[in-house]
């Protein structure tokens, strides 16, 4: 078992928070990038997502 001082624990939490924030931001950027790339590929194939009919999901 490791014992930490309050200062050490606080620094660890701040470090973890920075890593989580960075990862969340990077994931959001990747999601945007992948979406744009996919839409671009589909448009190149002549498929426009804005013109496709959407599925009607059964709500029951």
Image (cartoon, rainbow, N blue to C red):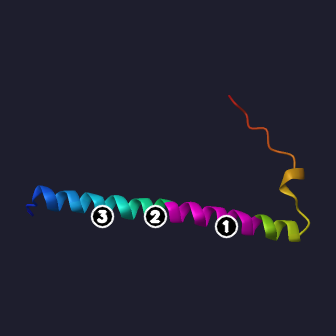
State the residue at coordinates (44%, 64%): 22
Give the CA separation, mark 3 to mark 2: 12 Å
Q: Quadrant of the C terminus?
A: top right
Q: Earlier in the sequence, mark 3 or mark 1?
A: 3
State the residue at coordinates (51%, 61%): 25
State the residue at coordinates (80%, 68%): 40
- Counting other residues with Cα less than 10 Å from the Cα at mark 2, is it few (<14), some (14-19), or many (20 or more)? few
Taking 20 as reference, is 8 left or right? left
- Counting other residues with Cα less than 10 Å from the Cα at mark 1, is it few (<14), some (14-19), or many (20 or more)? few
**Closer to us: 45 or 35:** 35
- Mark toward the viewer: 3 or 2: 3
**Closer to us: 58 or 37:** 37
State the residue at coordinates (10%, 61%): 4
Magenta stretch, residue numbers: 25-38
Q: Which mark is residue 34?
A: 1
Taking 37 as reference, is 31 left or right? left
Residue 14, x across and y down, in percent: 29, 59
- Mark toward the viewer: 3 or 1: 3
Taking 37 as reference, is 16 left or right? left
Q: Which mark is residue 23?
A: 2
Taking 28 as reference, is 41 left or right? right
Q: Earlier in the sequence, mark 3 or mark 2?
A: 3
Q: Quadrant of the N terminus?
A: bottom left
Residue 19, x across and y down, in percent: 38, 64
Q: Which residue is mark 3?
A: 15
């Amino acid at each position: 078992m490791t014992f930490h001082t309050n200062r050490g624990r606080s620094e660890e939490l701040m470090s973890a928070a920075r890593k989580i924030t960075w990862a969340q931001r990077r994931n959001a950027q990747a999601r945007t990038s992948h979406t744009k790339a996919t839409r671009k590929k589909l448009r190149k194939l002549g498929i426009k997502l804005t013109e496709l009919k959407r599925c009607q999901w059964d709500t029951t």
